[in-house]
Amino acid sequence: MKSGIDKLTETYYHRDEETRPEGERTSTEEKLDRLLTIQEVCELLNVRKTYVYWLTHRKKIPHIKLQGHLRFRQSAIDEWVRTQEIRNADTEEEIQDRS
């Protein structure tokens, strides 16, 4: 069962071009940039909810609070994962340089 926020998000991102206000973003990528629930982020990252809550509390993962509900932009999570990968690669290089 979908929550009110999920229904609103789905309706917003699937509107016809004719009903979209003038000047509103319309690229395919932005249409697909949906808001994820904490459960979806946990499944995507294969981690526990407590870890994602910890990341949001520490402001280490991009998130949105909508009336007390956490949501995550798909594109922001994808980018965050890429930055984590780069950061880890940099750390490995530093370790090799010390050897």
Image (spheres, rainbow, N blue to C red):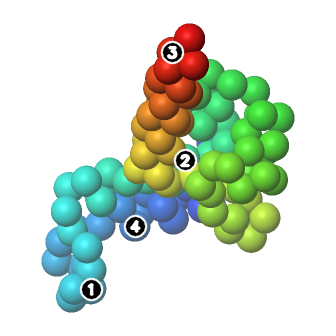
Q: Is residue 55 left or right of residue 89?
A: right
- Residue at numbered disc 1: 21
Whether residues under marks 2 and 3 lie with C-beta atoms below 8 angstroms apart, the answer is no
* Mark 1 vs 2, N-terminal side: 1
User: Along the line of sight, which residue is nearer the eye, 67 or 61?
Assistant: 61
Whether residues under marks 3 and 1 lie with C-beta atoms below 8 angstroms apart, the answer is no
User: Along the line of sight, which residue is nearer the eye, 95 or 34?
Assistant: 95
Q: Residue at x 51, y 65 (%)?
A: 8
Q: Is residue 3 left or right of residue 80?
A: right
Secondary structure beneath dot 3 equals: helix
Separation (CA) of disc 4 from disc 2? 14 Å
Residue kind at label 3, given as amino acid type:
Gln
How crowded is the residue under tag 1: few (<14 C-alpha within 10 Å), some, or many (20+)? few
**Residue 26 in picture, x, y percent from top left:** 21, 68
Whether residues under marks 4 and 3 lie with C-beta atoms below 8 angstroms apart, the answer is no
Secondary structure beneath dot 1 equals: loop
- Residue at numbered disc 3: 96
- Residue at numbered disc 4: 12
